[in-house]
Each structure stands twice: as structure tokens, then as C-alpha cells.
Image (spheres, rainbow, N blue to C red):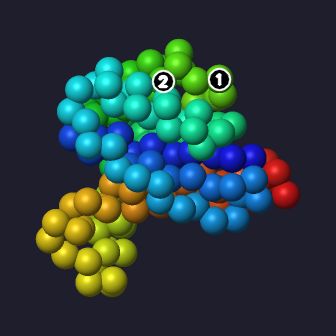
Amino acid sequence: MIIMSVDFGDARTGIAVCGKSEMIASPVCVISEKDFDKCIEKTAALAKEQRAQEVIVGYPKNMNGTIGERAEKCNLFAEELKKLVDCPVKLWDERCTTVSAHNVLNVTNTRGKKRKAVVDAVAAVIILESYLDFRRNTGESAT
């Protein structure tokens, strides 16, 4: 199944996708858009372009498991996205993915403007890899 993941942000939104084999999550792009509705429209267009059969939206719960303002905004994003795409849209716990993305970029010595340009796409890859691991471990994968 082709699955697309979204790391929604107020200014930049990372997008990643995996192919039908569900083996590798790859970064697609970062949507630079501050307008909430336009960001949703651009994300929906990418889902259609990528032929996504499922969209996973990062859901940043607080470390104690509670739902904060950021998670509520991501939930609203997912609900609005559902209205524009012809596939399921699911929330996926993404605690610490941005921190993990920064750690990956530290290892590759990616700094400055280049880091800012890719960190959200890397976070989307981490979200998708986590979801794919879940699918494999629970027997939900297509393979």
C-alpha cells in the first residue's frame, strides 16, 4: 500500500511516502506554507499526486500522554484533510520525532539553511517508519 506521512507545522510541513512494498520511507518535500487551509490543500494535492492509499498525520502528544494545543491543531488538520482525499487519514503518535530528525541531521553534519529545509521531511520519514514498523509487528502490512 502506498502510504504518505505528514509532519504538520505552522510554517513548514514535511511529507514522506513509501511504496507498495512498505519497505522504505522516503522524503518527498517540505511544504512552506503558513496559511492553514492552503497547507491542507497542498497536502491533499500531494496525496493525490503520490497516489496515497492512506495518509498518516503526526500527532504530537505531550510526553505524559495528554493532548495539548499542538496535537489539537494536528487533529483539526487531519479532519480537514479527510474531506479532500479519497483515502483513510489516521493520526500517529509522533512524540520526539523532530528531536530524532535533528539527531539524524547531526550525524550527517547537515547544518544551517540546509538543515532547516529538510528537518521536517526527515521527521515525516521517522513518523512513517514508526507506522510501518507497527504494521509489520502487528501483521497489518501488505507483504
How many badges with numbers are in the image?
Answer: 2
Expressed as whole percent of the image width and height from the top left, the position of residue 58 reads 44, 43
Question: Does residue 68 lie above or below 123 as drawn?
Answer: above
Residue 94 in sight from this viewpoint: no
Expressed as whole percent of the image width and height from the top left, the position of residue 84 reads 53, 19
Neighbourhood count class around disc 2 (C-alpha, 10 Å): few under 14, some 14–19, many 20 upward? many
Residue 43's mark? none
Residue 28 in sight from this viewpoint: yes
- Front residue of 12 and 74: 12
Q: Dot 1 lies on which element?
A: loop
Is residue 77 shown left or right of residue 54? left
Identify which residue is drawn at 47% across, 54% down: 28
In the picture of the structure, the residue carrying the numbered disc 2 is: 81
In the picture of the structure, the residue carrying the numbered disc 1 is: 86
Identify which residue is drawn at 75% across, 47% down: 1
- Front residue of 25 and 50: 50
